[in-house]
Image (tube, helix red, strand yellow):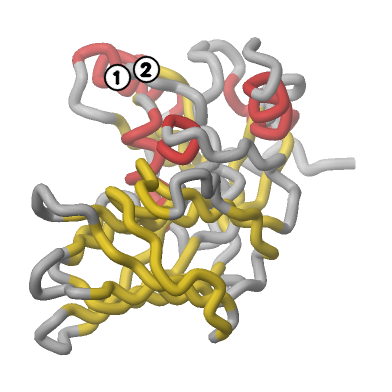
Amino acid sequence: MADPKKYERIAFVASQSPEAQQALAQLTALYGNRAPEDSDVIVALGGDGLMLQTLHQNMRSGKPIYGMHRGTVGFLMNDFRTHDLPARLEAARTTVINPLLMRATDVHGKIHVHHAINEVALFRQTHQAARLRILIDEQERMPELAADGVLVATPAGSTAYNLSVQGPIIPINAALLALTPISAFRPRRWRGALLPNSAFVIIEVLESDKRPVAAVADHDEARDVRRVEIISDKTISIRMLFDPGHSLEERILREQFGV
């Protein structure tokens, strides 16, 4: 039998919106508010932006993270209710995700290392299309992609920017990554690829002086890159909690049917 006090010490974090701040005050009055490092669970109040920020800040803590929707987009969040939160946390289902690790080298030789929960994306910085060479596990797979950019998305991120550029939706438990072009010009009909999540992706920027490219891991940006290495970081496992019947697996499945 589960320990009924498993999630007794709750840390609340909230966005700055009035809606989220009001929720923070209500929940703190009911359950107290521990510091994240002294908590059993972290509850994020806001939208998906706040959830991504919370996941980044606590990805190495081992703390489970439960979101409640008090923002704009709430794909990663549970419904907001103040009643009997410890019981909801106890009944919640766990989804484990691994972030992407981006190692980008810019034209000056500086190395930028960042993690991404959703995706690592490369974008052209000027009016000219980017020219990119793609290698998978150090084997060239595409000698030249002319496009606005390209991205590598996790299953958790497959319904975010990846979906908006016509990338595939990936079930959360699938051991896959999506490699998706952004407005591909050549080869015009290339729609991307599904890769095993063990893949080591290398993207080299051709003509980086003439056609500069930026690399972005969720919200961390490196400009004027010439080489970007991307791999799923299996050393980090992030635990997200979802109410029964509203799991991330279920939401991703519904997205595929337009529900």
Viewer-side residue, 73 vs 216: 216
User: Circle 2: is it few (<14), some (14-19), or many (20+) Cα within 10 Å?
Assistant: many
Question: In this orientation, which residue lies closer to the viewer: 66 or 149?
Answer: 149
Tell me the SS state at disc 1: helix
Q: Is residue 17 above or below residue 218?
A: above
Q: Tell me the distance, in whole angstroms, between the alpha carbons under discs 2 and 1.
A: 5 Å
Q: Which residue is mark 1?
A: 20
Residue extending farthest to the bottom is 109
In this rendering, does residue 41 appear at all?
no
Amino acid type of the residue tagged 1 in the rendering: Ala
Mark 2 in CB contact with mark 1 (< 8 angstroms): yes
Residue 173 position (above or below residue 105): above
The answer to which of 251 and 137 lies nearer the viewer is 137
The answer to whether residue 113 is left or right of residue 179 is left
Residue drawn at (33%, 34%) of the image: 49
> Splitting the image into 4 quarters, where does residue 248 fall?
top right
Q: Quadrant of residue 2?
A: top right
Badge count: 2
Q: Earlier in the sequence, mark 2 or mark 1?
A: 1
Which numbered dot is residue 235? none
Q: Residue at x 68, y 40 (%)?
A: 5
Crowd band around label 1 with a 10 angstrom C-alpha radius: few (<14), some (14–19), many (20+): many
- Does residue 218 appear anywhere in the picture? yes
Q: Which residue is mark 2?
A: 70
Q: Please determine whether, in this image, residue 216 is positioned above or below residue 233.
A: above
Where in the figure is residue 66, as x and y percent of width and height?
53, 35
| Residue 164, horizontal then vertical, whole percent | 43, 30
Query: Disc 2 on helix, strand or loop?
Result: loop
Residue 59 is left or right of residue 170, and the answer is left
Position of residue 157 in the picture relative to residue 44 (left or right): right
Q: Amino acid at mark 2?
A: Arg
| Residue at image point 25% right, 59% down | 130
